[in-house]
Amino acid sequence: MPVELVTLQTLFRKLERLSRLGIPPLDEVVSSRTGGLPVPRFAGKTIHSSYDPLEEARRFVDGFLRQNDLRPGDPVAVLGNGFGYVAEALLDSGFRPVVFEPLPSLLVGMTEHRDAGRFLERVPCFLIDDPADLYRAGPHKAQLAAVKATLVLPYVSWLFPSFAESFRNKCAAIESARSASCKVSVVSPIYGGAVEIARYAGAGLEANGMTVDFVDASPFGAVVPALRAFHAARDRKGRVFDAGIASFLAWASAQVEARIDAFDPAIVVVLPDAPVGEAQMRAFRDKGRRVVTWFVEDRHLLRRWESEAASFDLFFPIQKGDFPQELAMAGQGHQHYLPLAADDKVFSPAPLAGSALAEFGSPISFMGAAYHNRLRFFQALAGRPFKIWGNGWPSEGPLAPHVRGGGRRVNAAETARIFNGTDVNINLHSSVSHEGVNPFGDFVNPRTFEIAACSAFQLVDHRSLLPGLFEPGFEVECFSGQPEFLALLDASLSDPASCAEMAARARARVLREHTYPQRMRELLEAVFEHCPPEAGRRIPTAREIASERDDPSWKAIFRGLDGDALVDFESLHRHVMRGDPGHPLTKDETMILMLGELRHGGR
Amino acid sequence: MAAAEPALILAFVRVGDLIQLTPLAKGLKRSRPDSPVAVCVLPEFVKAAELMDGIDEIITVDRDALLRLSLRNDLPLNSLLESASAVLSPLLSRKFRVAINMTHTHVSAMLMYLIQTADKRGPVMTSGGQRGISHPWMRFLHAYIAGKEICPFNLVDMCAMTGDPDSAAGPIPLSIRIPDDASRWADEFLDRECPGTGPLLAVHMGASEDHKIWPPSSFTLACRRIRERMAGVRFLFVGGEGERPVAERAHAFLDASGSAVAAGKTELAQLAALLERCDLVITNDTGPMHIAAAAGTRVLSIALGPIHYSNTAPYGEGHLVFQPRAACAPCSFHVRCVNPECKKMVTPDAVADAALRMLAGDPLKDGSIPESQAYAGCSVYATEWGEDGLLDYRPLVDRAPDFRARLVRAYRRVWFASLAGEGGMPGERSVVTQSGTGLFQILLKLESLALKGRDTAADIAKAARNPRRQAQLAEGLETIRACAKAIREIGQTVPEANSLCTMFALEEENMMEAGLEAAARENADLFGKLLRRTRSLAYLLAVGADLPAPVDEGRAECPG
């Protein structure tokens, strides 16, 4: 369950769910000796003082404020609400509590014993069952944005000590990631759909204030088919080709390493199948860089992670299940689930007209490569108004008349047009080992997010991780097999208005939670928790550098720069190069010019 | 009495360039004997600097350390600048009487900006971060970068003149200080490796860049011709470690007794001592060539690729330099030749013949070498001191001088008079006549632009003080801008006029005066200089070509 904003309605829903799921309710609620206030007991422990919960809360808050340098009005993250006495004490002291409650039964209990409606009007309150969910995009992020300190109620520390520690760490990481900027290299694979994902990730990191070098390795991709063609006739077992690819990848890895060394990032984000070998990763880490991977491929298909997982500082899978255990067995103890997302600049609603509508429009479409399960599954659509886009589709057989674009790879802009021009977009996740829907499919493909971002309607096959990202039946329509699919297809085609409403909800969800900047914010927060970049590698602001020395010559360097501007040597060099008419260059400025000239090849 | 502040020569350059700066160092000393002379070099060239005569102190700046610092991203800015300051402190913590930049790079110009002295010469960054080149001879050097084939002066002279030497005291040759231990080593080496009494020829077949290298096979053939015609001659193959294999092959091919390979076996001072003991050095345009000239040994050099004899020929009297007569020679600094035909135009027979003439004491008079097949592809020049006290060149192959030769001679007189400021330029008051080659048409146009610019600038200077004439200013400034632009364009399109125009542009770039009236007067002066140089050049070309006598303009020049 992601972090959930608590309203009275959600609490009532929660009450139903708790009773349905059999989650233990409160032991009992007793009255305090002073004032007769309600005090809950849970798992044999009293959550607040049974003598005077108000006085206890006041003292607790006073002690907290003495230890933290806060100003009135500052927000404070509070883990554990109980019946809300501590949050109210914070409010009374002039601070803004933002409450996270791991025990739904406590909040539900509060609705029965206190005026929860009034409390929730004054205190933003969230339910959370995994501290990692703090990193997820959602309304809690806005509340956490300005949080200056974290307060954990004693009962949470007693009951869930590791949860409490993790919560503190994550709040600190969110604060660190927000206030810091670094150089980040994002290395793409040499081919495949993940090249675009890498590009989007780079842009997402930039949107989060990072200075990004997108290392586009896709130009190397042309070598692979060339090598294959070159060896094809005499290399039936493929050994010569494999050896050639290995030596080529070693060479390409060296190029990537040289480029990354020149950029000198604090963080290197590696996409699967990027030309970065274990030697490079070791070298990067030896140089103090944090090396992480966003593993946006199916772990069952691409198994390079088994040998490489331990080489990363942090592993971001798009899959869950037993993957964390498998990663741990492979030597990687730090992982953070990071699903895919959509670039809402590329994928946005744009109705088609005229020739574009004629070319890309269709009642039913599919865009993707011709995997085995799709080839079989789509046979049932032969003869329907159905267009197939993407590479690898057969030029003969029942589906051939449906194939558009000559069976070539479709670029992102064209893909957006297809989604926008289609009444029902079919989204069947690929599988090489099933005839149709993969009953064990877990991760959610980029197409799901991209169709949604276009405010286009989709029928997507059921995936175990989908409900955490979209609400089936409300934001997307899901099917588990062909009969269900065909029924939903016909129903959808006959009710375009409902489809449009569902699609609009899906788009709203994407914008709220599933854009690349949001994903990359999550990635950065996890990095800042598990493997924070070295302090010297963070890009400081002009104000921070200017404060390093207190003389006019030094201050003069920063004339005309916004104090909050992130400044590294290159940007400062450019600033000095632009010059400031009327002010003779100082010694420090001249040194910057000189070092910049040397850095750029001058002698 | 406190010791005088030293003069500084900033020279992040290589061995040959350092040796060529000895006349500058000695000239500085000659004009101010009380002031020591310091040279600032890169650490790897300290050994070369120690050979330089006239140098009292060597300062090193580790530019590689600066480069390494510049590439570090882990240092906070403050620490980075402090570390860079520490690297530069040997230079920046001192005060100098004068600082002369002989390193033509942006980095050195920035460094010059920081050096503590009131008198900075050569490329210096301005306080606004712009390019500045102070001192007329340094500007002139830059003006000739694009037209080195018609440059009338040797680089050594252009550098030395930047130090404002006392010209009346006569030319200052290159000179080096060879340590006694190096001399002893050289004696022992030659006794051991080159026994005999015949003439000793050093041969240096390498160079810093491939396109400056005359093929080793040509060197070897030339040596063989010499040996065939002169009994007892001994060869000493010199160079660095990398040049040793080539030297050893040539040595084996010649199989000459009394010959040896010294390449890769010598320290710089030992190489100098060896070259000092030779009767002749045959070489490409290299550092050892300049060391030999500085050691007082006669040199036969071959100028190839981007090298032009007039710029970098061995400095001193009695040397000889070969220059291919290829239409494309010398190469531009911005091209990389893939078909260096010029290397074939200098023949082994011609080099051998010229070397034998030198060894035989031939006086090497003008035209003393008859035109022949061997010399058809090249020119040969002997070096001598000119009437102006600077290095000059005497063509040895007997052929009629071409227009370029006349142009170079005319330019030499114009520029020397203009830059050294000794007397007026010949014919500077004569109007350009419409005759002769196409260049006269260009000079006519330049004359017209210079006149218009000069008169307009003078008018602006007058109008600047008169409130009622303010309206004329904008129009006048526009006229000046247009004239300057047209002059620069002529420079870019007419190589023969390039130096006149580029010099004007550099002088304009380096105008010092602030305030409209003073700046206009300075501007008028610059246009006036261009006018006089243009007229003088046209006059000298016309006189030299027996064209109609130029007419005296008969009016006073612009004041200022």
Image (cartoon, grey):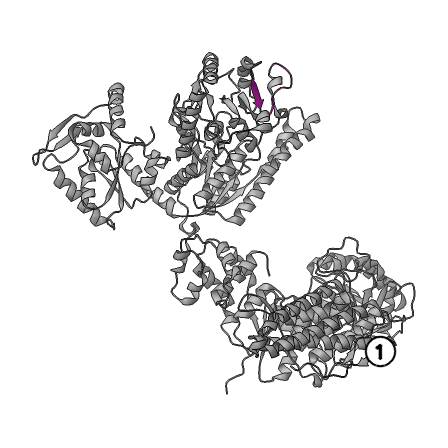
- Is residue A395 a member of the stretch shown in magenta? yes
- Is residue B185 at all visible to an observer of this figure? no
Label 1 Cα neighbours within 10 Å, binned few <14 / some 14-19 / many ≥20: some
Q: Is residue B301 left or right of residue A38?
A: right
Amino acid type assigned to the residue bearing label 1 in the image = Val
Does B306 sit above or below residue B297?
A: above
Number of marks present in the image shown: 1
Which percent across, then down, holds residue B267? 66, 66
Question: In the rendered structure, which segment of residues is drawn in magenta?
Answer: A385-398
- Is residue A482 at all visible to an observer of this figure? yes
Which percent across, then down, holds residue B122? 62, 72
Does A569 sit above or below residue A146?
A: below
Residue furthest front as drawn: B468
- Is residue B271 a member of the stretch shown in magenta? no
Which percent across, then down, holds residue B319? 79, 73
Report which residue position mark 1 lands on. B543
Which percent across, then down, holds residue A374? 54, 19
Quadrant where the C terminus of chain B is found in the figure: bottom right
Within the image, what quadrant is residue A43 found in?
A: top left
| Letter of the chain that mark 1 sits on in the rendering | B
Within the image, what quadrant is residue B454 found in?
A: bottom right
In the image shown, does B442 or B477 lie closer to the viewer?
B477
Residue furthest bottom as drawn: B1
In the image shown, does B462 or A221 lie closer to the viewer?
B462
In the image shown, does B75 or A490 lie closer to the viewer?
A490
- Residue placed at 90% from the left, 70% from the top? B399
Q: Is residue B381 left or right of residue B7?
A: right
Q: Is the stretch drawn in magenta largely helix, strand or loop?
A: loop
Does A543 sit above or below residue A144?
A: below
Q: Is residue B195 left or right of residue A547?
A: right
Kindly state the secondary structure of the residue where label 1 is placed. Answer: helix
